[in-house]
Amino acid sequence: MIERYLAQMSTYAGSIDGLILLVAVLVGFWFFAAEGMLFWLVWKFRERPGQKSQYLTGTEHHIKRWITWPHALVLVCDVFIVIGSIRVWNEVKQTLPEPDSTIRIIGQQWAWTFQHPGPDNELDTPDDIFTVDALHIEVEKVYHFKLESRDVLHSFSVPVFRIKQDALPGRSITGWFEATMTGEHDIQCAEICGIGHGVMAARIFIEDAGQHAAWVAANSNSTTP
Amino acid sequence: MMARTQNVRLSAALLLGVAVAACNPTPPTPGLALGKELFETCAPCHGDMGTGDVEIDAPAIAGLPQWYIEAQLRGFQAGMRGMHANDLPALRMRPMAMTLNRDGDIPSVAEYVAGLPATFPESTLHGNAGAGAERYAAVCVACHGPDGRGNELLWAPPIVQLNDWYLVQELQNFREGARGADPADIWGQQMRINTFALDDQAMADVIAYVQTLR
């Protein structure tokens, strides 16, 4: 359903959308049920001539059940949300599949720097490729990323991947993704990081094997760290 | 009934007019007033009077020529500056330049900055001005002039009013390709070639000499 409005382009995007949908449906149901009940009661017990209001302590069983029963049902729904959250958290954060390649992502006010491995597919070697605001990856390959910040808090967000990970100065945070389709999409900063936060945007280029090999070959010696 | 229908139609027309006006506001008139308004985006780093802030690597820009400021802002927008991984101050500056996206924005803010009183920041480096004079005469004087006031015909800006730390930083950027490496940046490429003749000490010496030209 969500993919009708924003493409799912990572292996775990569907799982995250499913969780969001689960939360939206359960919370949405209780929202409308509670609001419906509120307005129904307001209408049912509206002011009438000759009718006096009563003071209710709320301790009587037949009155309390209007709270306790929905409360219990909400808790049952919470169990489903917690189970779903743990499953998705485990898939996205606790599981770290073997990488086909590793990149470094560095946030700074107000740009993203990407360090790609060169033809040797090893990071931190002389043939690494550095780019600003342009990340190039190959489709259907598992990438580990090492996320860093040079100054303040940032958050690396790729909406089509459904990934959003904070970057903290002084720490290197490891994560992963695997793109499922080729294309060119937005990268955002999702953490207020100063006056230029709103324009701290970049692009991700998801290429097939041939395109990516050609890009690596063309750029492996063209930039310096 | 007829009057009520007319009122509804009139209200709908007014609402439509307001909505259209909100979606398509009249572009502001370029000029100093617009430049002053736009400069509010620059002031957090460059200061209210464009005097810069060394703590965040923001140089003094007050009083620089309008043509030079315009050229640099357009250079940032085109990716000639602010696209190198190690040029952190320029990485900060580029997105800010990208916000000047309406006709007249860049000339307006450049005119405003050019009209601010130029400052001559204190020296912070210690080079050998005597040795720098020889270097300056050999490498820099042809474009930046004997008085360091620049030459618009050669796209050489005045350098006497710039921070010495900023000048060294930019000379290093030119030499390392963080600036002046884009094929479209013709004048930057020319500047870059000249920095190949300067090692770090020579840069410090030249800048020390430039400080004496004030």
Image: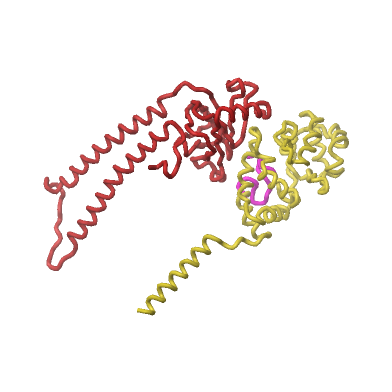
Chain colours: A red, B yellow
Provide residue A82's location: percent of width, then percent of height. 31, 33
Most foreground residue, B121 or A21: A21
Residue at position x 39%, y 35% from top? A16
In the shown orientation, is residue B21 left or right of residue B1? right
Quadrant of the snapshot with the C terminus of chain B: top right
Q: Quadrant of residue A152?
A: top right
- How many marks can you see? 0
- Give percent across and percent down for residue A211: 59, 30
* Observer able to see residue B19: yes
Q: Position of residue A189 (x, y in %)?
A: 52, 40
Question: Does residue B213 show up magenta in the picture?
Answer: no
Query: Can you tell which quarter of the image residue A122 is in?
Result: top right
Q: Which of the pair A21/A217 is nearer the observer?
A: A217
* Vertical placement of residue B70 versus A92, above or below: below
Left or right, B197 with respect to B53, comes to: right
Q: For residue B56: magenta?
A: yes
Looking at the image, is B46 positioned above or below residue A222?
below
Q: Position of residue A172 (x, y in %)?
A: 51, 27
